[in-house]
Amino acid sequence: MQETYLEVNIDKIRNNIIKIKNLNHRSKFCAVVKANAYGLGSDIVGREIEDLVDYFAVARLSEGILLRRAGIKKPILILGYVGLDDISKCFENDIDISVYDLGLAKEIDKLGYKLKAHLVLDTGHGRIGFRADQIENIRQLKTLSNIKIISAFSHFSTADEEDNSFTEKQEEIFDYIIEQIKNDFDLEFVHLANSAGTIRQKIFKDMYRIGICLYGLYPSEVVRDNTEIKLEKTFKLYSFVHFIKNIDKGTPISYGRTFVSSKPMKVATVAIGYADGYCRAFSNMGKVYINGYGCKVLGRVCMDQMMVDVTGLDVKIGDRVEIYKEIDKDANLIGTISYELMTNISMRVKRIYIKEGMVIARRDYLGEIYES
Ligand SMILES: *Cc1c(COP(=O)(O)O)cnc(C)c1O
């Protein structure tokens, strides 16, 4: 197919979930599908894995509503902020909120909607939540009449790093706070670990929250090397060659003439650019694969196209180009992580979903906007 598209393999996502669940069947499995399931498409992915999971986590109310519109019935938790104006929609859509600030919680409570909430504890990640020296603040939440605190959770900051000690400390602080407040609230369950804390440190609590590993990537190389779980990458990003030329020595390529050939070369132009999510930082750095050959990016990545070196290779117009074949290496090359490369894949890139060898769905976000 001559398109730039993202192919998502549902069977592989399901297999990754099953492998992780085999570590622990007692605890609940929370699928983190925020940011459109890290770019893959949260409504379709969510629908296709709902039977295997107990909970969904998202970052925004709109992401939660999208899951409900897709027919998802399992509980949904928003991991962060919801504006007061949107609280009624949490009630209407049966979406759990996070409570991380006493003042905000009181404001939400005053609105009068019966909501289920998860208490956020800051055990060292330093983003949101109540800290260990704020037990009295937490206890004041008992006075809320509409918000029901059903759970408490925290988040690791270094579970993907070599040194385990801070993760252990965070778990100790978590256990301490829970011990202090457990008689004040009817906590049905508590949750702590992300992908790294789950598959490496094997911290499960009553529920564990899995994001990146659903999609078949490891949070870091350290985690990959310190777990027996063998994940399979679940997506492939493809583009295609739409122009080929032979150039002489001394030919500049792309904006700024940052690449000038030092010998005669064969150059392919590929229909992907930074507007599709292939970062401009890959200029003169990135590597893509055509017919199995690794091809270097020449000059700057443009908004919609880029040029790659196919000198001496059997490459012709129409050939498929695989981007992010080694996504962790690619991310490392430009000083970021696979999470960011995935979530950068833009709306312009079509999505195709494969299950049991068949295409079960296609998604063209911009096409849907044009049609409506
Ligand atoms: C994003 C997020 C996760 C998932 O992290 P992964 O490393 O992708 O597993 C879990 N919990 C919280 C609070 C998050 O924000």
Image (cartoon, helix red, strand yellow):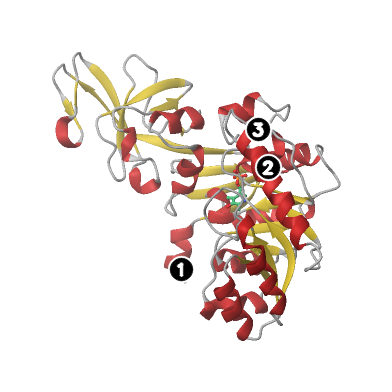
The residue carrying pointer 1 sits among few (fewer than 14), some (14 to 19) or many (20 or more) residues within 10 Å by Cα, namely few
> How far across and how far down the image is residue 248, in percent?
16, 18
Amino acid tagged 3: Glu
* Nearer to me, 152 or 351: 152
In the image, which is nearer the foreground, mark 1 or mark 3? Answer: 3
The answer, for residue 10, to whether it is visible in the render is no
Label 1 or label 3, whichever comes before in sequence order:
3
**On screen, residue 183 above or below 22:** below
Amino acid tagged 2: Ile
For label 2, the residue is: 13
Quarter holding residue 196: top right
Q: On residue 371, which mark appears? A: 1
Label 1 or label 2, whichever comes before in sequence order:
2
Label 2 or label 3, whichever comes before in sequence order:
2
Q: Residue at x 57, y 63 (%)?
A: 63
> How far across and how far down the image is residue 96, in percent?
67, 68
Amino acid tagged 1: Glu
In the image, which is nearer the foreground, mark 1 or mark 2? Answer: 2
